[in-house]
Structures are given as C-alpha cells and as structure tokens.
Amino acid sequence: MKKRLSVAVASLFVAISLCLAQQEPPGEVTVGGELILRIRFSAGGMTPQQRADAITVRLITILQDPNIQPSDVVVKPIAGGEAAIYVKEHLLVTVDKRHAEVHKTTPLKLGEIWAKHLRKVLPQVNVKPMR
C-alpha cells in the first residue's frame, strides 16, 4: 500500500512539474513604456505573446483616435461566460476564464479591473495631434 502511494505521489509530482515547465512566459502589452496588460495564457491557438501582439495591433488602431475618454472603455459579457473589453466599439481584449481563475474572480469582474486601469492609462498614452 505504501509503495502504491509513493508511486502515486511521485507521478503527481512529475505531472505538476511538467505542467509548470510547459507554462509559457507571459506576453506584455505596452505603449510608450507603460504596461497596459499582461497575458499569461494561450488561447485560440495563440501563445501569450501572440495574443499580446494581437492586442497591441488593436491598440494601435484604437489610439489613432485622439479623443479617447475613460468612458469609452466598456466591458461586455460574451458567450461562454467570458467578457470582452471594448474601446469605442473596437474589441481590445477578451477576458478568459483562466485569467479570471488565477485572480480568483469571474471574467466580467476581472474585465472591470482591467478596464479601470485602461480608463486611466489610455487617455495618458494617446498621442494628441499637433495644432
């Protein structure tokens, strides 16, 4: 019995170690040196860095609007119990269940936390046209 338990514990340890070793580094979305978001998990066939890069491309488009206001950043529930953050009706990021679980919350509540940060940061990093 003890031998079986030892084998089971060892197997569990190896499985956990393999999972941790396979975890990819987070992807970071930055603008002007300001950290906007950190993406920790793969989704939709993309690595965390690929997801961060896609968000950065969306963000570049969004920031072309010189009149971004904090109220333009909104969180909406989407299919599957996840949430999405939009800026002036442009999708910026999907808040998935894995990210929410890490923060011990729901995707909608985590979306609100991220949106609060975005409401503060986006108007600051947005380039205003010269007059």
Image (cartoon, rainbow, N blue to C red):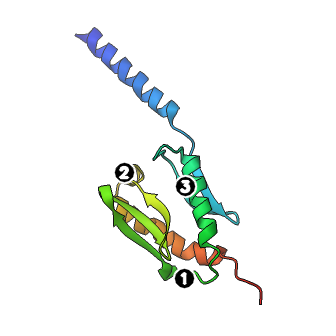
Give the CA distance from mark 3 to mark 2.
15 Å
Quadrant of the rendering where the C terminus is positioned? bottom right
Tell me the kind of residue under disc 2.
Glu
Label 3 residue SS = strand
| Circle 1 residue | 69
Left or right placement of residue 69 versus residue 109 in this view: right
- Of the two numbered discs 3 and 1 on the same chain, state the one appearing first in sequence: 3
Neighbours of disc 1 within 10 Å: few (<14), some (14-19), many (20+): some
Above or below for 85 versus 28: below
- Tell me where residue 35 appears, x and y as whole percent: 61, 61
User: Which mark's residue is nearer the viewer, 1 or 2?
Assistant: 1
- Tell me where residue 62 appears, x and y as whole percent: 59, 71
Label 2 residue SS = helix
- Tell me where residue 28 appears, x and y as whole percent: 60, 54
| Circle 3 residue | 38
Give the CA distance from mark 1 to mark 2.
30 Å
Above or below for 88 versus 28: below
| Circle 2 residue | 101
Within the image, what quadrant is residue 105 found in? bottom left
